[in-house]
Amino acid sequence: MLEPLSVVLLLVLFLLVTPPVPKLIRKLSNGKRMGAYIVAVAALVVIIAWSVLQVGESVGLAVDLHGTVWRAVETGGVIFGAGASVYGVLSVAVLVAFRIVLVRTISWHLRAGKSVRLPKVYGRRARRRILYLSAAQHGNITLYSTKSESGDDDDDYARQFIRSPFNMLPDDPAFLGAGPVARVWSISAELDRQGGEGRVEEPIDIDPVELHAFVTKRLESMRDQVRNESESIRGLTTHHHVIARGLIARPGASSRESKSQSLVDQRCWLPYSVASDEAVNALIRHPQAGLRHYRLVMVGSERGGVTDATGRQIAAEEDQEVVISAFIHLAVEGRMLYTEFVSTVLPPVRPEFHVVDQMPRGPLAYIVKIPVTPLRSFFGVLLGAPVRFISVLLGGLNFHAIVHVPRFQVMYDYGAHKSVRELGAHDELSFTQRLDAFKYTKIISQRLTEAVVDFLQCKGVNTESFRQQASSIITTTSINIYDSQFGDQVAIGNAGPVNQSSARPQSPSGGQSGAGT
């Protein structure tokens, strides 16, 4: 009876992975779902053990079994070795079915212009989680983690060596998801000097919220208020952006409860992802808070087509896949106006992720190589499937996550370690992509400084010092992208152009790591 039993178990296990059964399992409660997985694992263990015994007998290994077992197999009416044969056939069927589903998903469901129908989500917990992630994706709050994930002693040493108040690393965690830092500058101007009258007793009243609105309108005019449509920077967008460290104290566990109560929803112990307009205005007027506000200006990667006077197309629309971001911080404190500018460049995605646009249509798609899938031999996948199946089930029991629950921790790090988009980014920029990054960084920088000068002049503030600092910044003709420079100068702070080498500092072991911008 063991041989028929193994065949039945194989068929049951195969049914567990067919599309209708997983849908039914997902509708079950957590306890019943775990029971279904336990049954599948038990069946798999029995099948593996029985298959090993059959293979051992077929190659003449000494297997000490009672004759009654073999007589039971013979009287069961099932051919000897049927269990292993069915296991092999079903395994091949699973691999072939996976290949068909993979190709159809990539070449058909994910093709350009195809509207994707999202799968139905079962379970209230899963639906709440997806809704939360959807809101966070379009939120304006970024909590970043300061924990090092490099695992490289040389890299950690270089970070400590470089880090100072006037140096920023290309992968600074505060700007997670925007790409490496390309350029940084800042300007400070006195607000107690009137034009032509020298210093005054009381500083001139400057509302930073009003200044932000003025600067934003001036920046958006490059998109909306142009003479010809071809002059418009159509991909330019502006947003509020709030940055804070992700390490937050649990309410009641520290005297600094205000930060935790303002950033974390205590009903679900998850951080907020959207700051209201009232909260944003309060942060703008209180620049010394632990949360830092930026006006985020982004220039998208889409480039419009070109046509001549007759309407004939000269150049088609193109997606450069490069996003230039500018983080603008304006602070009024200590009778001074502080203007900070940080530009980043998000590189294009890696070439292997363009497989969805390069796969052939028709039967050839089922035999071409797909770079994003792991390269494994057929027999390696076939024989290693049971072990991987068990390891995945056991891997779902994350004891570290069970123990480190936010509500049980005095301090909990809600910050993000990595960006999914940056994990898939290419490590090189083409010539035109570099020039586009340089162009839009210069354009936004120039527009920002002129807008601040115009606003200060309208308020009667002496702008001579601001103009001098802005002039030295604008005339700088270089930005850093991946340790390479256009030119040989970088402007940092209000000290004007600063000569800087792109070489990385030496660590004690002689390696090179990190870079200053």
Image: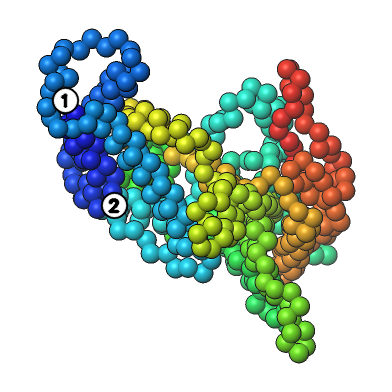
> Image height check: is 93 above or below 114?
above
Quarter of the image with the N terminus in it: top left
Residue at horizontal 77 percent and vertical 46 percent from the top? 480
Residue type at mark 2 is Pro
**Based on the displayed image, in which of its 4 quarters is residue 5 positioned?**
top left
Horizontal side of residue 364 vs 250, given as left or right: right
Horizontal side of residue 462 vs 240, given as left or right: right
Residues under labels 1 and 2: Cα distance?
A: 33 Å
Q: Which residue is mark 1?
A: 73
Q: Nearer the viewer, residue 15 or 379?
A: 379
Image x and y of residue 483, in percent: 77, 40
Residue at horizontal 38 percent and vertical 64 percent from the top? 117
Quarter of the image with the C terminus in it: top right
Horizontal side of residue 426 vs 409, given as left or right: right
Observer-side mark, 1 or 2, equals 1
Image x and y of residue 176, in percent: 57, 46
Q: Which residue is mark 2?
A: 19
Sequence order check, earlier mark of 1 and 2: 2
Residue type at mark 1 is Val
Horizontal side of residue 3 vs 401, given as left or right: left
Q: Nearer the viewer, residue 443 or 6?
A: 6
In the picture as drawn, the residue positioned furthest to the bottom comes out as 310
Q: How is the image coloured?
A: rainbow
Disc 2 is placed on an element classified as loop
Q: Nearer the viewer, residue 267 or 230?
A: 230
Q: Which mark is residue 240?
A: none
Image x and y of residue 221, in percent: 67, 74
Q: Residues within 10 Å of mark 2 (few under 14, many from 20)?
A: few
Q: Is residue 219 visible?
A: no
Disc 1 is placed on an element classified as helix
Residue at horizontal 56 percent and vertical 48 percent from the top? 369
> Image height check: is 98 above or below 397?
below
